[in-house]
Structure formats: structure tokens, C-alpha cells
Image: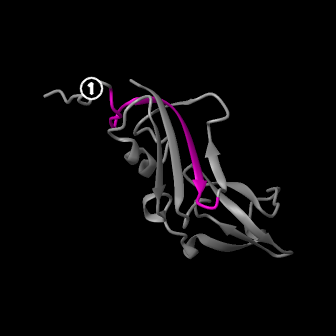
Amino acid sequence: MVESTTNKTNEPVVRPDSYLTLHYRVTALDGEEFLSTFDMSPATLQMGSGQLAENLENVLLGLNAGEHYVFELPPAQAFGEHNERLVERIARTGLPEGMELKENSVVEFSAPNGATFAGFLRSLDATHALFDFNHPMAGKTIRFEVKIIGIM
């Protein structure tokens, strides 16, 4: 059985495997902007490929091209609650030699399997560094604005 990729007006709608051309913006409710494509070329992405957070992709399903949408998502539907267990105080001697450490910056780490992950360096003293491994928008209600330009 082939599922319809169009709505009642025969316009394509976003599906879990669609390719999209769109503009999007993610902000906190206080206006702090996390990410935006509105001032540059539109983004092109494939749904389900990890290019956009899964929770953000989920709100796009079933939407039409040519429309402008704004969603308000609580932390559980956006980037999760802030988890204090992901805030870690690490001895400077336990960090890779030569790692550049600057407060209020993002530091990239390599996992044993070769993957990389990032931590936000909250504070630094002579012996320790305090890293936050939560997503920067964790714990915040966000505003997700999207203008879908094309769907394939």
C-alpha cells in the first residue's frame, strides 16, 4: 500500500522521510536566539537523518509547503529538562594535555569509540573545571519558528 504524500488540496506534506527546504529559528521565550537560518540561505535536510532534533522534526510532520508556523515547546518536548548529573567538576590534570580552556566556551571531547561530544565550560580555577554537558537549551521552553519552502 502506498501512503499519500499530499493533503486534501493535493499539496505535499512533510513525512518522516521527506527532504525539506526551509528556514527555521529556535529561541528561548526570553528572546535568546539559539539558531536561525532566516538571515541566510534556507536549510535543506532529510527528515530522520539527525540534522534536526527528533522532537523538532515531529512537529513538522503533516505540515504544508509555503506556510509559516510557530510552535511553543516545553522542555520535555524540546531539548529536555536540565539534568544536574550532567554537570561535572573535572580535575585539570584529568583533561587532555594542551586542551584550550576558556570560561563560557564550548569544549569538544573525544570518546574512546572515536565519537565527539561537547561540554560548556562554566567555570575554571587553578585545579578544576566545571563542565555542563546538557544541551544549551535544556530546561527552557522554546519557540520553534519554521517556514517550509519545499517538500520532496
Classify the position of the C terminus by image quarter. top left
Residue 79: x, y in percent? 50, 59
- In the rendered view, would you say 58 is above or below 12? below
Q: Quadrant of residue 126?
A: bottom right
Q: Between residue 65 and residue 99, name the one nearer to us.
A: 65
What's the amino acid at mark 1? Thr
Classify the position of the N terminus by image quarter. top left
Query: Is 99 one of the magenta-colored residues?
Result: no
Q: Quadrant of residue 118?
A: bottom right
Question: Which residue, as the protein is rendered here, is positioned at the far right?
Answer: 126
Q: Is residue 32 left or right of residue 60?
A: right
Residue 128: x, y in percent? 78, 74
Residue depicted at 58% across the width and 29% down the height = 42
SS for callout 1:
loop
Residue 123: x, y in percent? 78, 71
Q: Between residue 143 and residue 94, name the one nearer to us.
A: 143
- In the rendered view, would you say 100 is above or below 125? above
Residue 84: x, y in percent? 57, 75
The residue carrying mark 1 is 9
Q: Between residue 5 and residue 134, name the one nearer to us.
A: 5
The stretch in magenta equals 12-30
Residue depicted at 53% across the width and 53% down the height = 143
